[in-house]
Amino acid sequence: MIGNSIRAHAAVGFLLAACACSASDRRTPPPSGDVAVVRVRTIADTILARIFEDNPESYTYLGIPEARHDGSSDNTLPALARRQVRDDSTLAQLRAIDGDSLLGRPEWALYGTMREGLESGEATRVCRSELWNVDQMGGWQVGRAYLATIQPVGTDSLRAQALARWEKFPGYIDTEIVNLQEGMKLGYTASKGTVRLVIGQLDRLLAVPPTESEFYSPAARDSNPAFASAFLALVTNQINPALTRYRDFLRDTYLAAAREAFAVSAIPNGAACYQAMARAYSTLDVPPDSVHRLGLQQMALIEAEMLAIAERSFGTSDVPALLHQLKTDPKYMFKTRAEIMAFSQDAVDRARAAMPLWFGVLPKAEVTIEPVPTFRETSAVGEYNPAAEDGSRPGVFFISTYHPEQRSRAGPQAVAFHETIPGHHLQIAIARERQGQNHPLMRYMGNSGFSEGWALYSERLADEMGLYSSDLDRMGMLSEQAWRAARLVIDPALHTMDWTREQSIAYLASHTTALQDEAVSEIDRYIIWPGQATSYMLGMLEIRRLRTEAESALGPRFDIRAFHDRVLEDGAVPIPMLDTKIRRWIADQPGGTP
């Protein structure tokens, strides 16, 4: 999963924020007669500037060289309305351009990705998400806590910028209360279960001394005593009181008004909201009932693969009993938090060494592994936060080491490959390092269908690369695949077919090695992010289909490194555009056919 720090400052259609154009992004102007190319680039430059204007925190998340780090986004409802009017105008300009005339040019992918993002943003307005923005996975309390830990410091200028940014934070929090109050008036609320989870996170944030708070991190990483004193006063007298006001509002006022139902169908226009969200995340238009059936089909195929391994290496044909054993028998469990970290690090090291045989273009950025911050480790899953553009920090794979004695050794290798190499880290780093080749929007925009689809594809690719240590780890990989098939089954059923939370938890736990607390956390994630969970398997199946078509068409001329480079070179394009691109690539190969 791509980290919540990015999600916290991104519209659904623009899941990765854009960066400022550096000198290396300035390209030769197009021929003066190519009006469509000029228009597309002009619109892209305009969107780029607006994303930074709307989300100045993106400079910090992305580590943009020579950027300022004192800005704070405007989360007021009038500001959102102004942005929507502006986006509508931009979308109209894009719709006036003949996208097919751009085929064969870099601007074709740029045009399609911008249009997809704006159209998805337009469609998901029906959800009114800004009015019920209570989220234990990607909420502002998660994103801003991470932002504090990467806030640049170390000079007088950077210290001043840090103080300027975080002095605005209490106002941001108070605006979130105002927005939730408006949602209560109009019938848009988060579920009670979600609200309780966020209250718990805030309780844990507020329980530690100010100097141990995530929000004190800028001062903790700086050596200036005066700055430390000023920042401590800011956390103690402004930030913590604002967090307390928000927590108390949730606990004393909002919780009683929050909806009992978990399904998004319970909000006004909820059915339309679910369809729009699922379409926006995956970039594929698949009805909920079809997604559900596809999940059942995929689950059956994966369980057949599990059966073969169970008989071969575990001496049993009872797959459900084996899955239960793998997540309960102490011999399959970790013993310490450090052991979990070392196990995942070893997997990443093997993947890094194997990369050159499978990819022609390799990432320069490094990736490190860190434990999930304590205040949210009970509800966290593995996640990746990308490296900084300026090289000041590597990509980070956050893993939960909570209750290691209850964590199965089956699965962590697949998760590591999903989040790092050949998954998220490789894909995102390659996209971001194409300065001067792709427009900055293409290096930083994305969608879950592509990014999560690629990461899930990478779990199986890792087996081809010889990265799994044993059949225990392959069972873990298949459990992770079954997990994503279960998402296709559960997510539409939970939100559109009246499945209960308990029914969803039971289905996931019985078909995978997910522990009870993992299954609970996972279902709570589906509740707050309707539709997102379906994008993994939907995207992976499309990437696998395109690879199969290329292998069939090209035969012995098929080059796996070239295929992977073609898939990744434009960044996270909408899945239908990837289909067009790969089909054209196949046709252009000697002996290839469309």
Image (cartoon, rainbow, N blue to C red):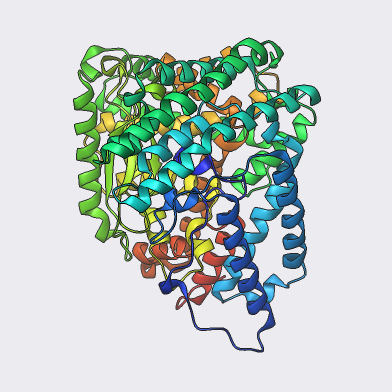
Q: Where 280 sits versus 194, above or below?
A: below
Q: Quadrant of the N terminus?
A: top left
Q: Nearer the viewer, residue 80 or 571?
A: 80
Identify the residue at horizontal 37%, vertical 53% (top origin).
157
Identify the residue at horizontal 19%, vertical 39% (top origin).
346
Quarter-of-image position of residue 33: bottom right
Q: Which residue is farthest front?
A: 226
| Location of residue 324 in the rendering, given as x and y in whole percent from the top left corner | 36, 15
Q: In this rendering, would 277 be left or right of 155?
A: right
Identify the residue at horizontal 26%, vertical 60% (top origin).
357
Confirm whether residue 113 shows in the render: no
Confirm whether residue 286 shows in the render: yes
Q: In this rendering, would 361 be left or right of 142?
A: left
Identify the residue at horizontal 43%, vertical 41% (top origin).
163
| Location of residue 354 in the rendering, given as x and y in whole percent from the top left corner | 23, 53
Quarter-of-image position of residue 347: top left
| Location of residue 570 in the rendering, given as x and y in whole percent from the top left corner | 49, 64
| Location of residue 196 in the rendering, given as x and y in whole percent from the top left corner | 55, 14
Q: Quadrant of the C terminus?
A: bottom right
Q: Where 479 sits versus 195, above or below?
A: below
Q: In this rendering, would 26 be left or right of 323?
A: right
Q: Where 247 sits versus 453, above or below?
A: above
Q: Nearer the viewer, residue 547 or 339?
A: 339
